[in-house]
Structures are given as C-alpha cells and as structure tokens.
Image: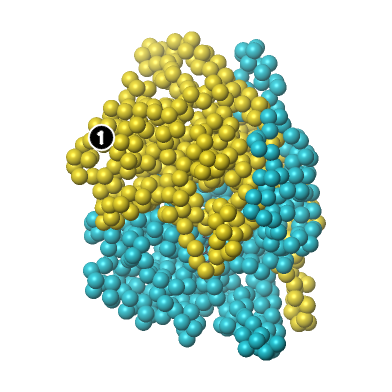
Chain colours: A cyan, B yellow
Amino acid sequence: MGSLQKDHELENEMVSVTNPLDSEELRRQGHMIIDFIADYYKNVEKYPVRSQVEPGYLSKRLPESAPNNPEPIEKILQDVQEHIVPGITHWQSPNYFAYFPSSGSIAGILGEMLSTCFNVVGFNWMSSPAATELESIVMDWLGEMLTLPKPFLFSGNGGGVLQGTTCEAILCTLVAARDQVLRNIGRENITKLVVYGSDQTHSAIQKAAQIAGINPNNFRAIRTTKSSLFGLTPDSLLSTIKSDVEAGLIPFFLCATIGTTSTTAVDPLGPLCKIAKKHSIWVHVDAAYAGSACICPEFRHFLDGVEDADSFSLNAHKWFFTTLDCCCLWVKDPSALIKSLSTYPEYLRNKASESKLVVDYKDWQITLSRRFRSMKLWLVLRSYGVTNLRMFLRSHVKMAKTFEELVASDKRFEIVVPRNFALVCFRAVPSVIKLR
Amino acid sequence: MGSLQKDHELENEMVSVTNPLDSEELRRQGHMIIDFIADYYKNVEKYPVRSQVEPGYLSKRLPESAPNNPEPIEKILQDVQEHIVPGITHWQSPNYFAYFPSSGSIAGILGEMLSTCFNVVGFNWMSSPAATELESIVMDWLGEMLTLPKPFLFSGNGGGVLQGTTCEAILCTLVAARDQVLRNIGRENITKLVVYGSDQTHSAIQKAAQIAGINPNNFRAIRTTKSSLFGLTPDSLLSTIKSDVEAGLIPFFLCATIGTTSTTAVDPLGPLCKIAKKHSIWVHVDAAYAGSACICPEFRHFLDGVEDADSFSLNAHKWFFTTLDCCCLWVKDPSALIKSLSTYPEYLRNKASESKLVVDYKDWQITLSRRFRSMKLWLVLRSYGVTNLRMFLRSHVKMAKTFEELVASDKRFEIVVPRNFALVCFRAVPSVIKLR
Ligand SMILES: Cc1ncc(COP(=O)(O)O)c(C=O)c1O
Ligand SMILES: Cc1ncc(COP(=O)(O)O)c(C=O)c1O
C-alpha cells in the first residue's frame, strides 16, 4: 500500500491509519501467535477430541456485529482460547481417530506460513515464477518417489499440479475427459455420458459429475461385496458398461480407488484400465489417503497398473504431513486439461505465456487465483527427507498392525476386512455382546 | 499421531522418528519463520516488483530429486531467500501496481496462521462447530456492514459462505441456477441454456459455464462501449435475450459486475435485474474488487439494485485485508446451492446434520474439505474495527483521486474513463508522444 505525498489534508488522514503491514508490528504479533500455537500443541492431547458445544453456541458468546474500534491481539487470542478452542474438533489430537489421519507437521505448518507471507496470486508463470517452478519440481520429485510411470512426469511430457482437494482434482479430470469425448461426438450428446465408480468410491466423484452437468441418472456406483474385499471387480465393470452401451449411452470416465474411504479397499487397476481402454474411458486413480504410503517400496505394488491410467491423485494433507489443502494430481496429457480449463483474456496475456516455454497452472485447475502450495510440500520433503518419511509411514502401518493383532486376539471383536494400510476395520461381535 | 506401547521392536523404531508436531520444536522453528517473514516485509520495497528470472531458472538451482536426509530449517530458509525470493513477483510490495491491490495485512496473516495451526477439515458442523459458526457470524457481520438486504443474511433466511475465489463462487451459483431450470424443463435441454455477461465481465464466468457443461456457443459476452462507460446496458441485454429466446434457447444466468477488472465499470444492477427477473434468470453480482469499498456509506450506492439479485460476492483477498484465498458469497436461497451440491454418504452422516439445526458448508461449495477461512476475516474485523477499515478504504480512494488529478493536469496523458474506486485508467496521449 503505497503512499503519495502531496495533499496535506490527505496526509493528515493517512497518519491515523496504521500501516497494516508494518514489519515490526508483524514481528511482535507474529511471535505471540507462535507461542499461542505452540501452547495449543502442548495441550492438544488434553482437550476432548470432539467439541462438546451445542449448535448455536458461538452466537451466544460473540457480539451481534463487528466492532467499531480496533481490539488488541492479546484480547483476540484470549477469545480464541475461550470461545473458539472449545468449539473445535481437534483433528490434530493424538487421540483423534475419525476419518483419515490429518497429518499436519511442523514443516507443513511453516511452509504454509511462508506461502501466506508471500501471498502471491500465482495464476500464471509470470505472476510469480518461483511458485510455478517449485510446484513443477516438487511434483516431479514426489512422482519419482512414487515411481510413477514417466508419462506422468514433466520429464515425460505429462506433469503434476497441486490442487486444493481431491474433489477439485476429480472435477478437473472429469471435465477434461468429458470435453475430449464431446469434441468427437457433439455437445448435444452430453446427456448420454456415463461415469463409473463403485459403491465404495468417494462421494467426490458423484459431486464432480453433478457439477460437470452429467445426468445424475448416468452415475454408476457399481456394487461391491465382501468377497472381493470391497474392490471393484472387472467383471462387474464390464457388464455395467455393456448394458449402458446397449442402452445407447456413452461411457467416458472411471474413478478407481486405491484405499477407499470406508475400508481402504484397493481396486484392481490393471484389469480395470484394460477394460476402460477398450471403451475409450478416462481412468482417474484416487489414492487420496493410501497413495502416500506407496513411496515405500513394499507398498508400491498397490499402484501396479497405474501405467494404464490417465490421471492419478493423492492428498498430501491426508498422510503426507502437509496441512489442508494439498492434493497432488498427475496427468499424462496436460493439454486435455488445458483445452477445457484455459481462459486467456486480455489482462492475462504476457510474453512468457506466448512463448509456450512456461506452465500456466491456471489452465490446469478450476480457479484462476492460486496459493503457493508447493512451499509446504517442499518444506516437508526437505525437513524430513525421503528416508525419514518412509519411516514415519511405516511406523503408522506398524502401529495399525499391532493394533489389528490385539483386536484379532480378543474374542469380543472381529476384524471386518484385512488391513491394507494404517486403517483397522473392526467391530464388536454381536453375539458376544448379547451374551454379556 | 498417537503412540502404542506394546511391541518392543516397534517402540525402538519409533524413537528414531521425531514427533512431527513436537510443541517446543514448533515454537523454536516458528519464531525463526516469524523473523524471516518480518524481515521480508522490512525489505519488500527494495525488491524489483516483477521477478527478473528466466523460465526454467529454478530447476538449475535445485537438486534433481528430493533429499534422502533431513535438512535443518536454517538451511531451508537460506535457500528460500537465495532461490525463491528472486523468483517471486512481490504482490505485497508498495510498488506493486498490477491487477488489483493484494491487500494482505498483519491481521489477515495471523488469522491464516491460526487457521493453519488448528488444521481442521470443517466440511460439516460437527467436524468443527467453531469453524462453521464463526463463518456464519462474520458473514452476517460483513453483510450488515455492507447493508446488504436482509434476505442475503442468515438472519433473513439467506446466508453467507466463504469460498476460495470468485471463480468458485460463480461456479456454485451457476450450477445451482442451472439445476433449478433443468428440474423444470428436463436435463436434455442443458444444451439450450444461455449465460450472459458483458465483454468486461471477468473470464471466471466463461470458465464456470464451461465447467458446468454449458454449450460454449451459448455464452454471451455482450459488447459494451465507452458511451456507457463500459457498463452493460439494459437495452443490449434485453435484445440479446430476445434473439436467444426466438432462436429457441433458454436464458438462465447473468453475471453483473460492480467494478470490472479492466476499468472498474459498474453495471446498472436495478434495470438489469428487472429484465432478468422477467425471464427467470438468476443474477449473480460480482463485486470482487469494489465490493469492499461499499462498507463506506458514500460508496454504498454502487450496490443499489442488489436487492433484486440472487447472489452477491466480493473478494476479501482483493481489498479487505485478508491473504488469498477468501471470497465472500451471499445467497438469498441457500437451498438452491444445497440441492445441487449436497452429497451425504454414510461416512458423513451425523445427528447434528440430521437435526437440520446446523449449517453444513460442504453443501454450499464445490469441495468437501474446507479450511477455517473465517478466522482471518474475524481477525481483520476485530484488529482494525469498522471505523478504521472504512478509513483505510477511503484513503486508498483518496490517493487514487489525487493521482487522477495529477494525471489530468498533465497534457501528455489522458484519463480513459472516470475513476470510480481506487483504480485510475490513463494512457499517454498518442499525438503528444509523436510530437516529441
Ligand atoms: C479415497 C478418498 N477420496 C477422496 C476423498 C476426499 O478428499 P478431499 O476432501 O481432498 O476432496 C477422501 C477423503 O476422505 C478419500 O478418502
Ligand atoms: C471483477 C472480478 N471478478 C473476478 C475476479 C477473479 O477472482 P478470483 O481470482 O478470486 O476468482 C477478478 C480478479 O481480478 C475480478 O477483478
């Protein structure tokens, strides 16, 4: 926020407006925030994991309207402690066992802070070259750690991008796939397009299809059973596709999952991709949670078959030590995304984009503006290093294995499906419960 | 990341894995980051605003793959300074005059840090009541500061939500509007739907239409001229709608802008809404940049007519002192969003949602997972207070006015369109340039 020195009346008024980015004030208040945050983590284990408040609790505690006058940070932090903390479900508590682990880390938090500090709006290369280039670099790094097939990497003419969430990653790839088909068969056929997943696939796919204008009747949540450990079977996919084709519909998108939300089931990528390819179906592989573990050689086999998929994503904010949001998406054909998602109005034109030597990530995602997300991934990779990261992930799996053994040895409980990663699915045995 | 005490071998391995959320280590490294950030702001004015690097600069400076071993934060911060800072376009520099001001502030930065620290994944009320409730509260506060008509506020059965960007806000409302129409006329008519904006409307609308499956031929960027100061005229909207209807098409969405990207033109909301209403068209008002100024009574008239619109958004990350991303969206009929964007799989079911007493913001947006964005808006409102915020905004407008006067008094330049807010559009007068 610049200043102009001319008009006296103007200057006088300016004086009373504090510089909202004064570096020394930022330092002073920043150190206070750090102590607040460190104290939060010191105590996080003591809070009840799930907030105990009732709906509407906060409006009873806060004023009816925004304050007219400034309030000091001390007072605000006191209110955060008194009124906000009790209303938080503590996702970072070691006692939190709902959903997938929310694996924040010091490196992830600091990376996010740096990204916040630079506050760049990195829609294209020129708007902040470092934001774009660091992202491409760390996505190739991580792709190599996962031994993703070369065609997914920039070095193999594919490439990676950091989205906010898997919902966005799926929506982007689904739209790219949709348009690829519609360019061939004509837009009027949009109502015939069919999307495939299993009844275990995350609801992100249904929502993406709905947003992209796919007929809700044309979303197939193919039934899975315990006999296939809740994986999508090639047979059931094939027969569903066949009956859709017979009905005059047009299959175009399959979301296969490595590590489903409910039981970490693994869909058999190889056979599914084979079927999909025959029907020109785009295959997206959603490894939101389990993908991270695949940087360990002993877990990499879960990704076998990914070489025949079109896109692959995992959430670094689930099990790779960044804070929300950080979804890593790789595609073999970035131009498919770009054809669907690019806009190039007058005010975004620039020489670097013209030159085609640079990546403009705005054309790989839903939104124009984007945060410097690679900073947190870079800090995680550097602060911990590949060896340590593998050890972390293994230790989580090992804890789960130990827990699984304990449960299995107790007659009151049963393991519902065998454990693949660090999620253990168990339940109380109904008959035993009744006996007591 | 909990710990299990049983298996000796397991424990031994765990010891060598440092706790990634150790509070004292977080404190130590956190204080270092704050000093780094404060120093960045102390020096930000000295950096060339636009990064001077060439495409591909960073891959020459960074290693080919992720490090195997951990690296200390000191070394990482040194690399940020040496290799990242030169590649950044300094959006926060007082010398930055591209696009709209990116108005980060201490309060905005600290709010973001708190949100990062809690790292809640606030998709529904239960997943962190405070995140949902604070958001609803600050959206009503800000709505009242803008004197938005009651039907946009929770207290009037509408409501506000924090999206990441305007792109998302427009996509959500457009999808809601699309489905409202399709429920009446049948999905097969999706190819007939028409979206309206002007040739000055932000490209976000075109992209949203494209993602939502609207036929690209049915996107109208209605021409504006200097005679209407680049505002969309009611006549041109009406005649475009008429010819579309005659052609058998179905108008359904209009994006009107208060403060366009190129010249801060203001579309005449009242007359446009009147026409739209007659044709059952959903009107979204995009005040991404200029909306913030409307908390000052003397600028509020720019929003006149908003009472007849269906939704309204502004970017707090543009001119309301939060960091990216923070788009404030208000709608009169949240149920329209919910009908289009809700999913309710088994793993998200819970009593609070069942009770219908709470807001589940996942159903108001594209993604499932969401950050605690209200924290930064709350900190901005409290740290500065309404009176000061108005003063800031006024001082920016006043600076622009002074600059406009200086330019106008210089024969070498001309003002292209009269200034509305803090953007001055001027150019060198070609004839004068030639004479020299
Ligand atoms: C397999 C799977 N896919 C997708 C998601 C949704 O991820 P996001 O919230 O990033 O959209 C989840 C969340 O638990 C998941 O388990
Ligand atoms: C009028 C207007 N609308 C929308 C946008 C895009 O906002 P976002 O990046 O939040 O999608 C801009 C950005 O400059 C804008 O000026």
Check disc 1 and report its element: helix, strand or loop: helix
Looking at the image, residue B176 lies above or below residue A285: above
Q: Is residue A61 visible?
A: yes
What residue is shown at x 63% (from left), y 16% (from top)? A10
Spot occupied by residue A226 in the image (x, y as percentages of width and height) = 49, 83
Horizontal side of A318 relative to B239 (left or right) equals right
Q: Which residue is mark 1?
A: B240
Horizontal side of B67 relative to A185 (left or right) equals right
Looking at the image, residue A236 lies above or below residue A140: below
Looking at the image, residue B249 lies above or below residue A54: above
Spot occupied by residue A88 in the image (x, y as percentages of width and height) = 68, 55
Q: Is residue B40 visible?
A: no
**Residue A425: which quarter of the image?**
bottom right
Q: Amino acid at mark 1?
A: Thr
- Of A405 and B303, the residue lying toward us: B303
Q: In which quadrant will I find the C terminus of chain A?
A: bottom right
**Residue B204: which quarter of the image?**
top left
Question: What is the chain letter for disc 1?
Answer: B
- Count of residue discs: 1
Looking at the image, residue A183 lies above or below residue B409: below
What residue is shown at x 47% (from left), y 20% (from top)? B419
What residue is shown at x 46% (from left), y 42% (from top)? B332
